[in-house]
Image: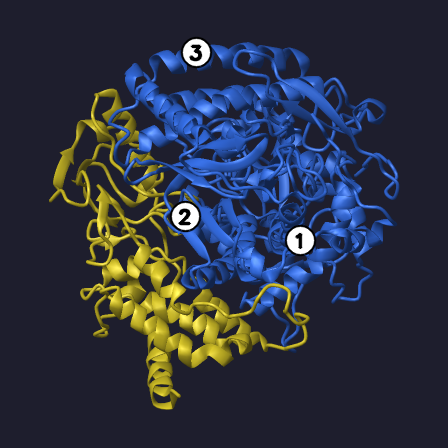
Chain colours: A blue, B yellow
Amino acid sequence: MNLDAKIPEGPIAEKWENAKFSYKLVNPANKRKFDIIIVGSGLAGGSAAATLAELGYNVACFCYQDSPRRAHSIAAQGGINAAKNYQGDGDSVYRLFYDTVKGGDYRSREANVYRLAQVSRNIIDQATAMGVPFAREYGGTLANRSFGGAQVSRTFYARGQTGQQLLLGVYAGLSRQIKAGKVTMFTRHEMLEMVTHEGRAAGIVTRDMVSGKIESHAGHSVIMASGGYGNTFYLSTNAMGCNVTASYRAYKKGAGFANPCYTQIHPTCIPVSGEYQSKLTLMSESLRNDGRIWVPKNKEDCKKKPEQIPEEDRDYYLERKYPAFGNLVPRDVASRNAKLMCDEGRGVGATGFGVYLDFSDAIQRLGKKLVEERYGNLFEMYERITGDDPYSTPMKIYPAVHYTMGGLWVDYNLQSTVPGLFVLGEANFSDHGANRLGASALMQGLADGYFVIPYTLGNYLGSEKPEKISTDHAVFKEAEKSCKDRIEKLLAIDGKRTVDSFHKELGLIMWEHCGMARNESGLKKALELIPALREEFWSDVRVPGSGANLNQSLEKAGRVADFLEFGEIMCRDALTRDESCGGHFREEHQTEEGEAKRVDEKFSHAAVWEYKGEGNEPTRHEEPMTFEHVKFSSRSYK
Amino acid sequence: MNLTLYVWRQKDAKDSGGFEKYTDECKDISEHMSFLELLDVVNERLIEKGKMPIAFDSDCREGICGTCSMVINGRPHGPWKKTTACQLHMRAFKDGDVIYIEPWRAKSFPVLQDLMVDRKALDDIVQAGGYISTNCGSAPDANSVQIGKEIADAAMDAAACIGCGACVAACPNASAMLFTAAKISHMNTLPQGKPEAGKRTLDMVNAMDQAGFGNCSNHLECEAACPKDIKATVIAEMNRAYAKASLTKR
């Protein structure tokens, strides 16, 4: 597997300029001769589709939702980072770059991150021009807020709906190109197979989720922007439909999958309330600015009402263990400690998997009115979901799977190991290392789609001059047949268990053994449990109905079948990465105080998995990560 | 709690459809469930019995994507104000309740199956002009045009629309005025949106008419049903912009 990252020559600040100058261009009149396929219509896919169409390419864009406006980028709350330094507080491209590499725990590629920080400034300009109503100061300039992992205010926001507003900006641009006939939009279409020809990406096979029709689509290049794989855990903050199928199908066709074990667990989510739970809801991280996190000191108090537990019997464990940062420690540290408390039997709530986030001190100190101004909408949302009023009783929170830093391996040009297949946004692996900073996901999705792929794709088309093959070609017919066979196989099993019951069981295995804390024996156990569950799935799942029309059980079954294979790769990666870094915490590698310990001399690399065929173990390759600008140091929040 | 559900079942667009009653499948329902989790549980039980589950749309389940779309006891998204069906919780109901669940009802939203409808008509309206025609790369610095906080806030109020279509489902005329006007208001309010304001308004209103949505006769059911609290005043703004654009059209 060729893992040449193709990092351009020159000092880090000039690499992107040098690259853009060295790229081959496609003459404006020739752009219309190229057909580009884009899977996904979120911030990355949607912005790529609109921008490539503006340049003159013919774009076909696919999403499983009923409209591109509903992609899950829409759910991001907090904001988007950009090195604008509008606040004059010392921010710069270099500082955003530095914070991101350090926040990623030294497992990302410096050159990519630097470019991300550079183009971050253009994103804010572009989004504003598209009509995104960012928050403003009274004087009319853009407002900023601060966010975790940074000491400057560089986060732009639109109330608590930044992802929604950015996506609607992207959707507006995309709509304009659909109207102009330059983008053909395929909604309620799910990609089931990737097609390669002579080693290049040649197209995809989709299922029309309304008619059930299996269709082939050919292009000169395929762009994957299909999001993350958090739903492998069943419960996550992802949308119900988020899935790994598109990425996984690409992996099976030769695209390397990098660092699948890197998952981000967000500390402040509403806890699971029962077995029927279908998804987890995030409560903005900003709540930790004023809320105090605690659990009872004594196990016996866990079932009491919080008001009945006197002050001296409460353990404000983050304040106790991390006096310098207190309740504001980074996401991974806050999450792990909540788990620790619950594992000790001191968790609260019906399930015992929850900790208190208490605002009574803040209300006393600031007054109810100010607390309401700051957090009113969040309190309202919390009350709607739980029925508890956070003004009078502490919130209960627990960590939940939120984002996946791993993804398909890409070089500096965002091209995967399959020529012609490009990967953008959360679906690729490159920029966040082992841990993503808050407000950086929106930035990366838009950087890739608006400002990187329009250049790098042109270079591929201009220099490699790929041919487009007909959808009548045997490779498409074979791919269609394999999709149809798989659907028939799923429908024919007619076993006893529902698809969801398998997905939930997989989720529990993953959460238990490949969640917030991992260890060798647990991961080995998961590697036995998952194949057994997969076998049971293929012999006992019940998928009612047929493939020839709208069938939601069938859609889910296809996705869960892929999660059941992909979960194993996550565990395998977590097992071989014998160190702790960022979101990947191996219990064997911690300091005496229980903090994560990297093993830089052995693991300063991206682990890239190569598919080796049915029944064979995948091969692990390494792309070394070298750090010329940001020097290794260990994070401390004491 | 134990409930009785009457759920609209319809195989596909051609089927005439009808209500089906469910009681056994809706026993022992926890008040902590969301409304869609109730349907998940009913579906699991239906599949176990060898029956087809109820098809319904949902995705983010946190009230922002606008995918979920069902009429619950005659009200789009159900009894709670400013709340999508996915955020409605079973605390809103009590033991023994009878609940009717239907899809959005509008000529422009054909039923695909059970509770799922096709809302492509809303995309068509946006494609007619719900954008600012700026190509990527040509944007000036974001702070080069100052926008007063009040203006930015007003644009944001309108931009909060999630495009679910509850306004259409609630309207006796199945009008999409609130949806269309919210998008027009968002864009026309901002300085960036001014150059195309007239053309945008005319094009989007025409697209709305072409899609077969009804007219507004001031029932204001749309505002009452809107999960994001979009105010019907945007419709007045749109009507004014439409009149102005019609008179000054070149």
Which comes sooner in the sequence, label 2 or label 1? 2
Q: Earlier in the sequence, mark 1 or mark 3?
A: 1
Element on which disc 2 rests = helix
**Picture quadrant of residue A300:** top right
- 10 Å neighbourhood of mark 1: few (<14), some, or many (≥20)? some
Residue on which the image places disc 1: A455
Closer to the eye: label 1 or 3: 1
Q: Chain of mark 2?
A: A
Residue at image x 25%, y 27%? Answer: A546
Q: Amino acid at mark 2?
A: Arg
Q: Are marks 2 and 1 on the same chain?
A: yes
Q: Which mark is in front, 2 or 1? A: 1
Which class describes the residues within 10 Å of circle 2: few (<14), some (14-19), or many (20+)?
Answer: some
Instruction: Look at 35% across and 77% down and name the residue there.
Output: B202
In this orientation, which residue lies closer to the viewer: A322 or A146?
A: A146
Helix, strand or loop at disc 3? helix
Question: Whole-percent x and y of residue B143?
Answer: 67, 73
Secondary structure found at label 1? helix
Q: Quadrant of the N terminus of chain A?
A: top right
